[in-house]
């Protein structure tokens, strides 16, 4: 219990957005990549997800962790199958957001949120867990609805209430994982970095120096281990090699800059460590399934 409390207390939880969505036509998005964690509450109809096309129906909650591709199908009936890129170009044909208006169509609500340990490590992504379904958890379902209601309102104190509700929602999700013995071994293994100051120093150094040379030799110097050992050391604790972690951090930073700045894609690539803009664009599309320019366009609209 002490370790779990230590993990939870280290987390920085940030609300991203919340929406209520009508399903206009059934659609499947193959290799859908989410930059943030998503909790989806099925209000009417069905949603299928994952390799096995697991079904979630009214009242079920789906958790989709950030950082990995998954297949997701909205609506009952035979769906149109699209890539992420094609879906973003045609999404208004299939899904439409609404506020508190009554909906007679299949619909769902979701909350997108970010969770980081020590403001550096993407917590759920570091556990390498797949999407999963939560049944009959009325408290979690209620929190998702409350976040949506508050986020879509225009009342004093909204942002503060949304922050508190999102933190409550995230802790309830973690409690569900622990109480149902889901991925507990991965949590225990990954909690190692909460006790290793060298790894925490590496996380901070990488975050603060994304535009610099972050070779294994550089990282080995920060951790005070040999260049030959740094890859083994990092993978033993994190489950991935250090250069994959560095690229993921760079791409997350690039997404944030695309959302929050007017900098050119060339300048954003340089700022996160890519001198070659064409290579940056190729890696971005490989990771997220859409070009960097389309990511910016999506974020500039009222997105779903």
Image: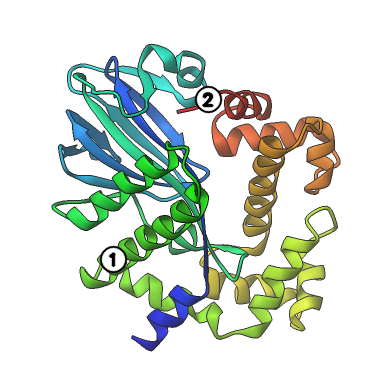
Residue at position x 59%, y 35% in the image: 286
Q: Which residue is mark 2?
A: 302
User: In the rendering, at what x and y percent does residue 164 appear?
Assistant: 44, 60
User: In the rendering, at what x and y percent does residue 120 appear?
Assistant: 62, 64
Of the pair 223 and 98, the residue shown nearer to us: 98
Q: Secondary structure at mark 2?
A: loop
The relative height of residue 60 versus residue 74 in the rendered view (above or below) is below
Q: Quadrant of residue 31?
A: top left
Judge from the rendering whether residue 234 lies leftward or rightward of residue 134; answer left or right. right
Q: Quadrant of residue 277?
A: top right
Q: Which residue is mark 1?
A: 177
Q: Earlier in the sequence, mark 2 or mark 1?
A: 1
Of the pair 87 and 113, the residue shown nearer to us: 113
Q: Residues within 10 Å of mark 1 (few under 14, many from 20)?
A: some
User: In the rendering, at what x and y percent does residue 179 appear?
Assistant: 22, 72
Judge from the rendering whether residue 269 lies leftward or rightward of residue 122; answer left or right. right
Residue extending furthest toward the front: 156
Residue at position x 38%, y 27% in the image: 29
Camera-near label (2 vs 1) is 2
The relative height of residue 58 versus residue 91 in the rendered view (above or below) is below
Residue at position x 54%, y 80% in the image: 194
Residue 207 visible in the snapshot: yes
Q: Secondary structure at mark 1?
A: helix
User: In the rendering, at what x and y percent does residue 93 appear?
Assistant: 38, 11
Q: Gap between marks 2 and 1, in whole Å?
A: 32 Å
Judge from the rendering whether residue 252 lies leftward or rightward of residue 73; answer left or right. right
């Amino acid at each position: 219990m002490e370790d779990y409390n230590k993990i939870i207390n280290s987390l920085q939880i940030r609300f991203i957005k919340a929406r209520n969505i009508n399903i206009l036509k059934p659609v499947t998005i193959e290799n859908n990549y989410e930059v943030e964690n998503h909790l989806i509450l099925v209000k009417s109809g069905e949603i299928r997800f994952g390799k096995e096309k697991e079904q979630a129906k009214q009242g079920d909650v789906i958790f989709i962790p950030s950082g990995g591709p998954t297949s997701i199908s909205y609506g009952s009936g035979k769906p149109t199958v699209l890539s992420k890129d094609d879906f973003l170009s045609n999404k208004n044909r299939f899904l439409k957001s609404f506020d508190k208006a009554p909906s007679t169509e299949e619909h769902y609500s979701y909350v997108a949120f970010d969770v980081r340990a020590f403001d550096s490590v993407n917590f759920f992504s570091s556990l390498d867990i797949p999407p999963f379904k939560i049944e009959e958890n009325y408290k979690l379902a209620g929190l998702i609805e409350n976040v949506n209601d508050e986020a879509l309102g225009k009342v004093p104190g909204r942002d503060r209430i949304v922050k508190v509700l999102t933190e409550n929602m995230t802790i309830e999700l973690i409690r569900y994982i622990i109480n149902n013995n889901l991925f507990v071994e991965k949590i225990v293994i990954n909690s190692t970095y909460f006790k290793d100051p060298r790894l925490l120093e590496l996380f901070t150094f990488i975050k603060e120096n994304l535009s610099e040379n972050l070779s294994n030799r550089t990282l080995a110097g920060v951790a005070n281990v040999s260049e030959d050992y740094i890859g083994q050391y990092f993978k033993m604790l994190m489950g991935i090699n250090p250069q994959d972690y560095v690229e993921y951090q760079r791409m997350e930073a690039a997404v944030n800059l695309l959302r929050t700045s007017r900098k050119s894609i060339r300048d954003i690539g340089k700022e996160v460590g890519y001198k070659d803009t064409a290579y940056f664009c190729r890696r971005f599309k490989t990771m997220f399934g859409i070009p960097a320019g389309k990511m910016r366009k999506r974020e500039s609209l009222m997105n779903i």
